[in-house]
Amino acid sequence: MDRLTKFRDEMKKNGIDAMVIYNLEGSDQPSTWYISGFSGTHSLVFISQENAYISTDSRYFTQVKEQSSFTMFPITSDKRVKDILKFFIEKEEAKILGYNASNISVKLYNSLFGDLDIEEIKDCESIIQNMRMIKDSEEIKNMEKAIKISEDALQETLNHIKPGKSETEVCARLEYEMKMRGGELAFPTIAVSGARSALCHGKPSNKKVKEGEFLLFDFGARYNGYCADITRTFSVGTPSDEMVKIYDIVYEAQVKSVQAAKAGVIGADLHNVAWEIISDAGYGDYFGHGLGHSLGMDTHDGAGASPSNKKEIPEGAVITIEPGIYLPEKFGVRIEDDVLFLKNKNKVLTNFDKKLMII
């Protein structure tokens, strides 16, 4: 079953006549790209049971024709988005409308959906979110390519790291290597060292990398719309006994969690595999985030392995497995793999060695 057919089946189940996905300067580029094929930053997608339309401005007229089979209606100075939406609703006789709520501000909602001739408008974003969570073979190939670009870039970057280099410098090198291999950045790269490695989402700074410190990278390339998300923590020179101890705890938690990962596992239960190992070691207070998240066209592409997810993780989902321990004013350790969930098993898509490496 193709995506559009499946999408329409889900529309029926949700009791809507048509679905609107508004992508305002990249606000919902992944969903638009996923369902229509169009990868530009500005568009209105309108899908009914009979027709599928896409509207954009003159920047993208040629691109839409090249990428999408949807019927194109141009946004012009005298045919604005609201006018086109009204036309679609009238043409398709849509009375119950679904939309992508999390990417629509209150101001935009009022501007776009105010005074429409409809009976009801519903948040039906979960339709496309649930579809996007389950990856097909082509999507997995794109993710594997993104991962290879990322890992090859990291391998080369390690050749250029030495004490005295700043976090900003090593970050720039890694991003350069990803781009030189055909990748875009999936998200801003984290490259933090020493006490700053305890900053879970720390930004690279002018701090110099020193001997006897951890250097943590959280990074990923995007390839053909699909993301990699990898974390590796290295020791610059010989680590202290405490550094080795903490690394070994995180490593055990990560390996055991990967071993437990398979389709049908409850997200919270998988999180607890890592949580119990870290907590039993006495560091539960220093593991303050979920074990992992869904990965795909967005780096956070849906529910994952977190305490709040009481649902089963479906077959075909790619989930990050990334436990960590962060000791304030000392250091932090995180290890992250991208894992494809299959029936009774998994496939680890990342390949970079995760044992403690001294550089």
Image (cartoon, rainbow, N blue to C red):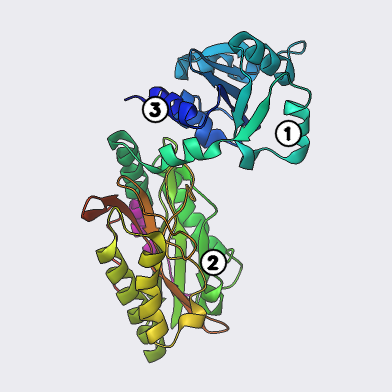
Q: Which residues are magenta?
A: 151-164
Do the residues under discs 2 and 1 have CB atoms within 8 angstroms? Answer: no
Residue tagged 1: 109
Q: Is residue 160 visible?
A: no
**What SS does tag 3 mark?**
helix
Please report the residue visible at 39 percent of the width from the left and 57 percent of the height from the top.
320
Please report the residue visible at 38 percent of the width from the left and 78 percent of the height from the top.
276
Disc 1 versus disc 3: distance between alpha carbons?
27 Å
**The C terminus: image quadrant:** bottom left
Disc 2 versus disc 3: distance between alpha carbons?
46 Å
Quarter assignment of residue 158: bottom left
In the rendered image, residue 258 lying in the magenta stretch gets the answer: no
At which x and y percent is residue 206?
A: 61, 68
Q: Nearer the viewer, mark 2 or mark 3?
A: 3
Would residue 322 appear left or right of 72 to someone viewing this image?
Answer: left
What is the three-letter code of the residue carrying label 2?
Glu
Q: Earlier in the sequence, mark 1 or mark 3?
A: 3
Would residue 71 appear left or right of 245 to someone viewing this image?
Answer: right
Do the residues under discs 1 and 3 have CB atoms within 8 angstroms? Answer: no
Q: Is residue 317 above or below residue 22?
A: below
Closest to the observer, 241 or 137: 137
Q: Is residue 267 visible?
A: yes
Q: Is residue 24 above or below residue 237?
A: above
Residue count near mark 1 (Cα–Cα under 10 Å), binned few <14, some 14–19, many ≥20: few
Residue tagged 3: 6
Q: Earlier in the sequence, mark 2 or mark 1?
A: 1
At which x and y percent is residue 87?
A: 67, 11
**The N terminus: image quadrant:** top left
Name the mark on residue 167: 2
What is the three-letter code of the residue carrying label 1?
Tyr
Q: Earlier in the sequence, mark 2 or mark 3?
A: 3
